[in-house]
Image (tube, helix red, strand yellow):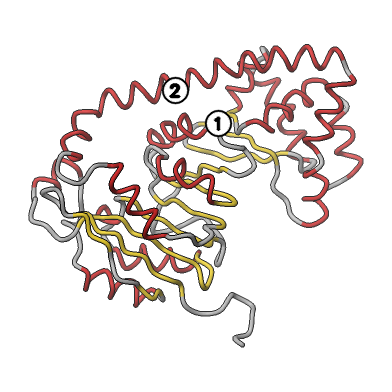
Amino acid sequence: MRTEAIFRALADLTRLRILRLLVSMELAVGELAQVLGQSQPRVSRHVAILCECGLAERRREGSWVFLRLSRAEGPDGEVLAGLSDLLDRTVEADAELAQACAQDSRRLVEIRDAREAQAQDYFAANAQDWDELRRLHSSDEAVEAALERALGDRPLGHLLDIGTGTGRMAEIFAARAERIVALDKSLAMLRVARAKLQNLPADRMELVQGDFVDLPFDADEFDTVLFHQVLHFAQSPAAVLSEAARVTRPGGTVAIVDFAAHSREDLREKHAHARLGFTDDQIHELLGSAGFNPADPLALEDGELTVKIWVAERLGTRAGRMAS
């Protein structure tokens, strides 16, 4: 991060407005253009300057490019940590900037509303299929309560929600986690999750497009990894759990919520299930081979399909650290 470049970047009203917006939430470049009332090419030029000096980061999601505040560590991170307070003080001292930011805040409400409307349209289009599947097992509320019991009072730390779907799990555990990364392969589902999660603090919430067999994260990056009704989509559950183990810190936790083994072959065709649930022995073998130590599972048996919750601890030592 170059100090001179940072101060040059901050010496512009539009770029200050962009940074002020990014403190609130991650935004697509097109959304920024809509809020600022400027052309997308012009906004893209400002974005390039902010990214070049290290104040912001781009992230591509399909054909969209999202922008967020940089998450550097060390001395650069300390500079960025003070950015929000600096922007607040600048707005207080500059009447022109304050007026522009107030207008931006009003337009940001429109962006939030548009995201929620898009999510509702998606729900409406798929509600029949989802309702049909829900009728086969315990209520969502019962499953969520059981998962909270299974995780106990342990700190969740940095949590990775694999196959986040609507973002419900991330929403539930947001208060217990230092930071949450919600990952999904589907762009449509990420847009739904973004609408649900857009009011969470931007510095503690991140949505990422990715595949559970090739996670775009470093080793030992997460304290808790969650699979909620996801593993049955895996052609190779062993490969998926091996990747989960790679990104889970030793002593960390993996939690799997899925169906016990069943014979509903229609779920393969209608809902793309690659696996018709799992036995306890299968999951224990998969977890053990991946480097986890599984605890006894919980079962919710008040539906045609039994929902199981398997929780396991990651074994081993941290990368680069000698065992004691």
* Residue 125 sits above or below residue 6 on the image: above
Q: Residue at x 37, y 41 (%)?
A: 165
- The answer to which of 146 and 291 lies nearer the viewer is 146
- The answer to which of 46 and 85 lies nearer the viewer is 85
Report the disc number at residue 116: 2
Residue 313 on image: x %, y %? 43, 71
* Residue 252 sits above or below residue 270 on the image: below
Q: Residue at x 29, y 63 (%)?
A: 237
Residue 315 on image: x %, y %? 47, 77
Q: What residue is pinned by disc 1?
A: 199
Are circles 1 and 2 on residues that touch, CB within 8 Å? no
Is 126 displayed left or right of 106 in the figure?
left
Element under disc 2 = helix
Element under disc 1 = loop
Is 237 displayed left or right of 63 in the figure?
left
Q: Residues within 10 Å of mark 1 (few under 14, many from 20)?
A: few
Q: CA distance from mark 1 to mark 2?
A: 11 Å
> Residue 307 lies in what quarter of the image?
bottom left
- The answer to which of 46 and 129 lies nearer the viewer is 129
Query: Which amino acid lies under the numbered mark 1 shown in the image of this protein?
Result: Asn
Query: Which amino acid lies under the numbered mark 2 shown in the image of this protein?
Result: Glu
Residue 83 on image: x %, y %? 80, 38
Q: Closer to the observer: label 1 or label 2?
A: 1
